[in-house]
Image (cartoon, rainbow, N blue to C red):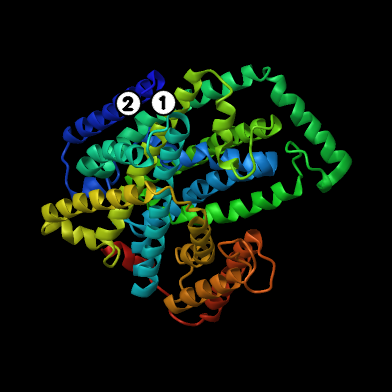
């Protein structure tokens, strides 16, 4: 085994073990019960909450997807990706505060939906959230495993199993409490590592002028050629703009159904801390994604992106740099995947053990809380093991992500509308969601990315149709209920 491979394995193992040890140590400092494992309610300040929010969303996927987007969609696609990732966090500034106020003892967004709209809509939302997060988890493990294979030839199964095992050491023991604490530590490494990698790359390419000159050229081309220009630095490059709008809709909708964020809504010390944390976290996320996307543009400009291999654009560029930069990138990826994987596993478990009328876990904690804590830990290990098995196969989950994005686009407005509108019923929300999904499906491509309905196969049209139709019907159903006694939000605070 080559020396650089040995060094990569050793440093990765040491870093992972350090997180595991610190996560367990932190959990042992206070009372660890079911409530701390799943909710850690009203416990975190602004600094830790911001770090946890950003670390939770910035997983190993940012090593691949933003750079891939930059390599063909250009600067407009990259900016759209950044906005799409930051916007749902900013939306939670408002809707998160609303949920805390009307349902202070809740655990999950799906639990609220069940209380607000009834068991059918609630369980459908829970399944959607679990499907999205599990797809996210397997994509994370697949991505980091492929990154290590690309640079060290380590088997996918070994990388996925090793990283997940290190993450489980503290996640299965301390749950959300450990996850939030290690997120803070991981965030403290993510930003410096990203800055070092970006600055070294920029210097190797000729300094800040390498970024300023093409930006100016792209702006000039936009003014001269309008949307017909094809320069990756052109801010009105049409394919990039269309993809950006598609991402803003799809990624915003999907992340609204990310239980990890709703857990952190409740984990913040109070509503003021929650608003500040999500506002700052959302604003920090946008430039991180944009910077990662620039690597793809740099790689494409240098002809380093082979046809069909755009997802490895970042590493194609890094392979042109000193070996220590690649090592930093792998450690960067390790930190990212651990910070998101612990959040995803704990989020899935929290839905599975609390999805009983929205606040069923409060009863569980009082009677048999120890058994439920044990069951939560067993579920944590089982979910992680299943994700490792799938990730070791190296399957692409892109199409599954797109399916989840479509469903989330159809359900997002009816679900969030229920936080404010009293007259729309569970049946109305289901019909609006189903109609939105049907409308979007007409434009949704097949796995081969061709049309099945005779209409254009276009994800932007699909996501937009799903959102618009479900929104219009939700508002219509609510207005049609005038004169009828609406839902009483006061019942949500009674447990």
Indicate the secondary structure of the residue bearing disc 1. helix
Query: Going by the image, does 371 lie left or right of 420?
Result: left
User: Disc number at residue 15?
Assistant: 2
Can residue 268 be seen here? The reply is no
Q: Is residue 143 above or below residue 358?
A: above
Q: What residue do we see at 17% from left, 42% from top?
A: 32
Can residue 400 be seen here? The reply is yes
Q: CA distance from mark 1 to mark 2?
A: 11 Å
Query: Going by the image, does 466 lie left or right of 147?
Result: right
User: Disc number at residue 189?
Assistant: 1
Q: Position of residue 305 (x, y in %)?
A: 64, 36
Q: Is residue 301 above or below residue 352?
A: above
Q: Answer with the quarter of the image where residue 42 lies.
A: top left
Q: Is residue 354 above or below residue 223?
A: below
Q: Quick one: label 1, few (<14), some, or many (20+) residues within 10 Å?
A: some
Q: What residue do we see at 39% from left, 46% from top?
A: 271
Q: Answer with the quarter of the image where residue 472 lies.
A: bottom right
Q: Position of residue 233 (x, y in %)?
A: 74, 36
Q: What residue do we see at 46% from left, 75% from top?
A: 430
Indicate the secondary structure of the residue bearing disc 2. helix
């Amino acid at each position: 085994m080559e020396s650089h491979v040995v060094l990569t394995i050793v440093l990765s193992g040491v870093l992972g073990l350090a997180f595991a040890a610190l996560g367990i140590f932190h959990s042992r400092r206070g009372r660890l019960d079911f409530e701390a494992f799943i909710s850690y309610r009203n416990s975190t300040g602004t600094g830790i909450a911001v770090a946890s929010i950003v670390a939770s969303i910035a997983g190993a996927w940012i090593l691949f997807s933003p750079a891939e987007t930059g390599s063909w969609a250009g600067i407009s696609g990259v900016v759209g990706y950044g906005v799409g990732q930051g916007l749902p966090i900013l939306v939670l500034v408002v809707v998160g505060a609303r949920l805390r106020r009307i349902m202070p003892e809740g655990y999950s967004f799906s639990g609220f939906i069940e209380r607000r709209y009834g068991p059918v809509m609630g369980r459908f939302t829970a399944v959607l959230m679990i499907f999205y997060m599990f797809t996210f988890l397997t994509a994370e493990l697949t991505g980091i495993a492929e990154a290590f294979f690309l640079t060290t030839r380590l088997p996918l199964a070994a990388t996925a199993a090793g990283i997940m095992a290190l993450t489980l050491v503290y996640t299965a023991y301390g749950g959300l409490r450990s996850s939030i604490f290690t997120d803070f530590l991981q965030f403290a490494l993510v930003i410096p590592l990203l800055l070092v990698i970006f600055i070294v790359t920029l210097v190797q390419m000729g300094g800040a002028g390498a970024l300023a000159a093409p930006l100016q050229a792209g702006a000039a081309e936009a003014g001269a050629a309008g949307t017909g220009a094809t320069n990756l630095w052109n801010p009105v490059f049409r394919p990039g703009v269309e993809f950006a709008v598609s991402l803003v809709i799809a990624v915003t909708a999907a992340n609204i159904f990310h239980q990890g964020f709703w857990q952190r809504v409740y984990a913040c010390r109070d509503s003021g801390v929650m608003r500040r944390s999500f506002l700052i976290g959302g604003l920090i996320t946008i430039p991180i994604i944009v910077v990662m996307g620039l690597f793809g543009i740099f790689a494409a400009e240098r002809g380093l992106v082979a046809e069909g291999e755009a997802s490895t654009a970042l590493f194609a560029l890094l392979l042109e740099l000193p070996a220590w930069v690649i090592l930093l990138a792998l450690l960067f990826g390790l930190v990212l995947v651990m910070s998101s994987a612990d959040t995803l596993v704990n989020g899935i478990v929290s839905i599975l053990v609390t999805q009983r009328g929205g606040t069923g876990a409060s009863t569980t904690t009082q009677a048999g809380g120890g058994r439920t804590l044990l069951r939560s830990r067993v579920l944590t290990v089982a979910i992680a093991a299943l994700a490792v098995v799938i990730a070791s196969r190296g399957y692409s989950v892109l199409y599954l992500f797109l399916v989840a994005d479509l469903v989330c686009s159809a359900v997002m407005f009816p679900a969030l509308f229920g936080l404010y509108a009293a007259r729309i019923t569970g049946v109305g929300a289901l019909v609006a969601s189903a109609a939105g999904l049907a409308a979007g499906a007409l434009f949704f491509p097949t796995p081969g990315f061709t049309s099945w309905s005779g209409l254009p196969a276009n994800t932007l049209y699909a996501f937009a149709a799903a959102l618009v139709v479900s929104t219009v019907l939700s508002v219509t159903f609510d207005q049609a209920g005038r004169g009828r006694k609406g839902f009483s939000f006061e019942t949500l605070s009674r447990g």
